[in-house]
Amino acid sequence: MEILVCVKKVPDTADAEVVLKPGGTGIKEDDLASGINEWDNYAVEEAIRIKETHGGTVTVATIGSAESEDVLRRCLAMGADNAIMIDDAAFKGADPYGIARGLRGLAGKGFYDLILAGAQAGDDGFAMVGPVLAGYLGWPHATLVTSIFLEGRMIKVTRELEGGLEEMLKIELPAVLTIQTGINEPRYVSIMGIRKVRAKEIPVLDPAAIGLAPGETGVNANLVRRTGLAVPPAGKEAEMIKGTPAEIARKILDIVKERGGVV
Amino acid sequence: MAKVFVVVEHRQGVIRDATFELISLARELQSASGLDPAAVVIGRGVKGFAQTLSKYLPRTIVVESETLADFRYETHAAVLKDILEKETPLVTLCPQSAFGMELFPRLSVESERPCATDCIKVGMEGAGLSVVRSIYNGKIHSRSTFAPSGGYLVTVRSGSYAPAAEAGSVGAVEDHPCPAFKAPFKTEFLGYREAAVGAVDISQSPFLVSIGRGIKDVENIPKAQELADRLGAVLSCSRPVVDKKWLGKERQVGTSGRTVKPKVYLALGISGAFQHLAGIKGSGVFIAVNRDAKAPIFAAADYGVVEDMFKIIDALKEQIGS
């Protein structure tokens, strides 16, 4: 089984203050920690588990710059066999279609049986690259995948629906699957592990090498065009409880007693 | 006259709530920009749904076939492509759900119409369409337009529009023939699988103590469990805690877990992703404790505390003890 996993590096904004650049053209990323997109980490782990059980190779690819190299090295340390960087100079500001066009060029060259991607990304959250890439390749896809079982040239997957419900599908290979968080427990990557893959060569491909014509990606090729960013207007805000932890605890217990009739 | 279509989401014999939110949006586009709204319902034995939908919109298009008994993007994208080519709606709407996320990006490629997903606001700007999306964990809003196209596809985040009420008049119901499919199919629906029922039913508890990413380590779970026990509450959690397998899926609050309506919801170290907040709509009093003063949970909670959750856990235990 030849597996390609598409990953990307994203800023961690879950517990951080996000500040716009002047003019609202983007966010200031200098003060934000960044790392592999959470969903992609599960996808890499899943690919490695399939390889460990059924054989084959795992290749991870990103559209990025030298700044994304640490994410690829981390994937190699987890157990990926190869890593490929597609130089992102031509992809600046690309929408999900532009990214999928770049990945199509790579997938078409590699004779992969299976492509995995995160179900969405923690930055712009379109959740589109996987199914759009499948559409460009003419391959079947499944999104929000929570388990994968191989059966020859077919795979069975479960997809996460709402309210704790899942559906099970049978899909013909080659296919594109987008991976939901919680599908597995991604392995820990040690500093020693990353040192071991320090010297592994990571080829950097330019758009021509993956058959992409000039103008096929980047801002000018976008179908969805970002016109501006803004900090959301403040809506209803919670009434803030202040004081020492003991004072706060007393107030919380008062509210619980009054509103819940409990404690 | 330009048209706006709502692709109806239904599962296991029920039209899902998000569809009625999109009907509100379609009516808004009708009154603001003069678009003619219609519902599109696809499946087997969906005439009953069409009758229901006719009470909401002036036009409902029905496509019925044995092959459409279960949802698959392959069949549904082919049907919608056929409808889009014949009807040429300017805007086609679908919920951003497991259904819409599987279907619309693919339909976009098949029908060669641009798609924007997970939008929270949709409106016409001149002859073009403009959308607002909530990105970077809800901390930034991004506005987008589209490359010029004969039609646009949009998926909408649940809760962005209020569910519509019946219109007070009955609209037309039209059958649209099911197109021929390019067999053989590459995907096959095998069935549904319910999440395993655990020992607890969090939806039955009047008081939930709920933990999120802020719990940091599996070793801290007993601290939260002990607090819940001493308060007479049930312990629940947000998605990251279940993803890490620190608590079972049956304790997850949110769209992909359980929907709850306790009298008291005490959220500790939960940032407030919209999927989580959608699971506690209509709860009694909602108290949130989080170290990040900018966490989106404070925009949804009744009471907020900006403090380390473990300090509050310890202080609560002390107060109960004395």
Image: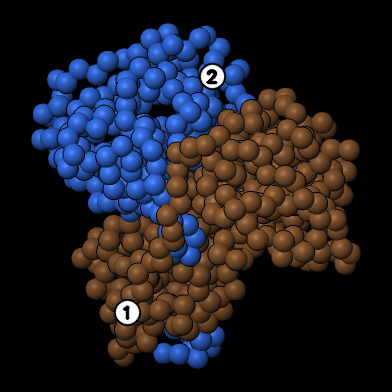
- Please provide percent x and percent y for residue A262: 45, 90
Q: Can you identify the residue that label 2 sits on? A: A218
| Quarter of the image with the N terminus of chain A in it | top left
Q: Colour of chain B?
A: brown
SS for dot 2: loop
Q: Tell me: B238 left or right of B216.
A: right
Chain letter for the residue marked with disc 2 in the picture? A
Question: Above or below — where is A36 with respect to B255?
Answer: above
Q: Amino acid at mark 1?
A: Ala
Q: Is residue A56 visible?
A: yes
Label 1 Cα crowd, 10 Å radius (few <14 / some 14-19 / many 20+)? few
Mark 1 or 2, closer to the camera: 1
- Please provide percent x and percent y for residue A169: 41, 50
Q: Tell me: B186 left or right of A194.
A: right
Q: Can you identify the residue that label 1 sits on? A: B199
Q: Is residue B142 visible?
A: no
The alpha-carbon separation of the residues under discs 1 and 2 comes to: 51 Å
| Quarter of the image with the C terminus of chain A in it | bottom left
Toward the viewer: A157 or B75? Answer: B75
